[in-house]
Amino acid sequence: MSTAPSLSVIVVCKNPGPRLHVALASVWEQRHVHAELIVVDGGSTDGSVAWLESQRARIATLVSEPDGGVYDAMNKAIALAHGTWIYFLGADDRLAGDMVLSETLNWMKKTEAAVVVGEAAFDDGRIYKLRSNVNAVARNFIHHQGTFYRRTLFEENGGFDATLAVAADYEFNVRLWKSHIRFKPIPLRIAACGTGGVSDGGDWRVYREEIAVRHRYFSLARSLPWDVLSVVRFVRKQLVRTLGRPR
């Protein structure tokens, strides 16, 4: 009987282009750990499927079929995972070094927390990590590129809400936080992340869904000030995009 892996790394994608090669290479380069790699492709037409098939020996599970969006694909991958821990790596992202997973697993052995969070550093200089005082009502307080979840969390709390297009990770994190699940920060940079994804683009649905999730879990009085700030952030993003365009 084979031993279950300590860690499942999940990558979901659709028409990711060549950056997917970099993302997966950063997993294959990991030292002193053998992670279960699961790739769920949404039916790419950019040649990614053929390339993935050529790398099939290095991918534990590969699925390519139409899906209902990124969170539907993530839920599919979770159902296929066997690892004690689950990590979601974006197709535009890469692990920050070849010892990241090994060092993270060492930290996991020292904690009973169900969520372990390191740093996610974006190419434009932004760095996200778990703050000591979580303010879950404000906005998403952790980024999946720096976060490891115990697989049992999904069995006990359900998966991502696939009716949300861009904020299901925020909804899931708030759901866990409201259930008093323990989040543990660790002093490691986990991933280097690309910019320009849906959540970075300034689309109103990002802020609309953030507001909707907030109102699921918090009172109107507590939510409204943060709703106003969400609108302000949206307007500011639009101004930056408009003023930054060539004339």
Image (cartoon, helix red, strand yellow):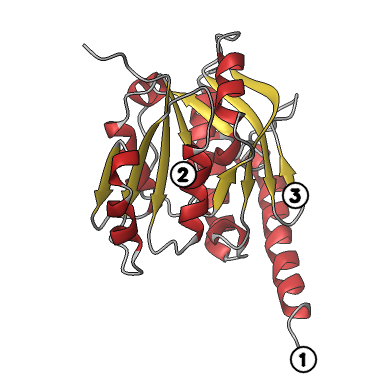
Which residue occupies the foreground of this view, 163 or 98? 98
Q: Would you say the residues marked 3 and 1 are in contact, meaning their CB atoms lie under 8 Å apart?
A: no
Q: Nearer the viewer, mark 1 or mark 2?
A: 1
User: Dividing the image into 4 quarters, which one contains the C terminus?
Assistant: bottom right
Residue indicated by mark 2: 168
Residue type for callout 1: Arg
**Residue at the spot 42% in from the left edge and 45% down from the top edge:** 11
Relative placement, left or right, of 41 versus 185 is left
Residue flagged by tag 2: what amino acid is it?
Ala
Type of amino acid under label 3: Arg
- Which residue in the protein does label 3 denote? 126
| Count of residue discs | 3
Choose top left, top right, bottom left or bottom right for residue 183.
top right
Location of residue 142 in the rendering, given as x and y in whole percent from the top left corner: 62, 36
Q: Residue at (58%, 35%) from the top-left corner?
A: 218
* Residue 247, numbered circle: 1
